[in-house]
Image (cartoon, grey):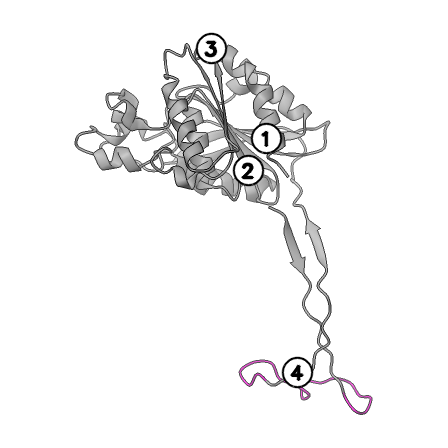
Amino acid sequence: MIRSILFPVLFSCALISVQACTTDDYEIGEKQQALKTELVEPINLTITVRPVIQSDTTVNYTFNGRPMEVIIKFPSDTAFKGTIVALPGWNYDNNEWCDKTELCEKALAKGYALILPEMGKSIYCDSIFPETRKDWLKYPTRSWIKETMIPNIQNDFQLLVDSQDNFVMGLSTGARGAVLLAMDLPEIFSACGALSGDFDQTRYTKDNLYNGYYGPYLEFTDRWTTQDNAVTSIAKLTVPVYLAHGDKDAIVPIEYSNQLFIALQESGNEASILNVNPTAGHDYDFWNSEVDAVLDFFKKHGN
């Protein structure tokens, strides 16, 4: 993700008598006149884009005419190290990562900025369809994150630029979103953390959330199979993924994480790992217990 600037080759005019160089001595353009040049070795300079933010802030970016809150937390006492986008689960508050886990406290102490978008009842689909429930159209899609939120944060704060260390993580449905974003934007995100997520909607075709977005499975089988499906698009998921799931999860069965992990291994993504907690369910106690492991994983796969 490091960018280098190459200084242009310097051209000099060689004349028999000492005189100033003029545009009559050479032309650049259509004539392509031969030039005598003195080659200079390029100089490599490492450029790191620095954030233009000093403290926590909250901004709003519009989706379908509605302002969507994005909380940005910035490390004020530690040197900036990178940025983590932390996605909420379905209908979870975007600040619960901070209120109900130690993620924000520990990430900020390590120098990471945090971006916490409001997502409401989004299932992180890339598009909406004629069959999508009308009362769900007000919730952001994954396209909004890619085409509105991230570009605005890059422009406004110089965060999430590809010369920095950036990571994405999520819990529950947010884990699905994190994996899909990591698949979509490997040039931005170096690694992904996915806790208690579901990644292949075809495993449970009676799920009300999937039906509410994609329409009935039997009528739109291709849509269910190819849209927003990390397993069927596994070849595109090239960044390392940290998966964790509780074996006692009664909301999102552990088979989802098992399936994705096997697919990652078979696709050659051997840096990905799966941690199974034999006693954990689908709750913040479990997700909080995974914070240290996720941050260690991000450190390992950063620059």
Mark on residue 35?
4
Mark on residue 278?
3
**Nearer to me, 94 or 3:** 3
Toward the bottom, the furthest residue is: 17
Q: CA distance from mark 1 to mark 4?
A: 50 Å
Q: CA distance from mark 3 to mark 4?
A: 72 Å
Tell me the amino acid under the disc marked 1: Phe
- Which region of the structure is painted magenta? 15-32
Q: Residue at x 27, y 20 (%)?
A: 208
- Can see residue 87? no
Quick one: label 3 or label 4, which is nearer the N terminus?
A: 4
Q: CA distance from mark 1 to mark 2?
A: 8 Å
* Residue 131 drawn at (x, y percent): 22, 32
Secondary structure, mark 1, is helix
Mark on residue 190?
2
Quick one: label 2 or label 3, which is nearer the N terminus?
A: 2
Which tag is nearer the camera, tag 3 or tag 4? 3
Q: CA distance from mark 2 to mark 3?
A: 29 Å
Quick one: label 3 or label 1, which is nearer the N terminus?
A: 3
Tell me the amino acid under the disc marked 4: Leu
Q: Residue at x 44, y 42 (%)?
A: 147
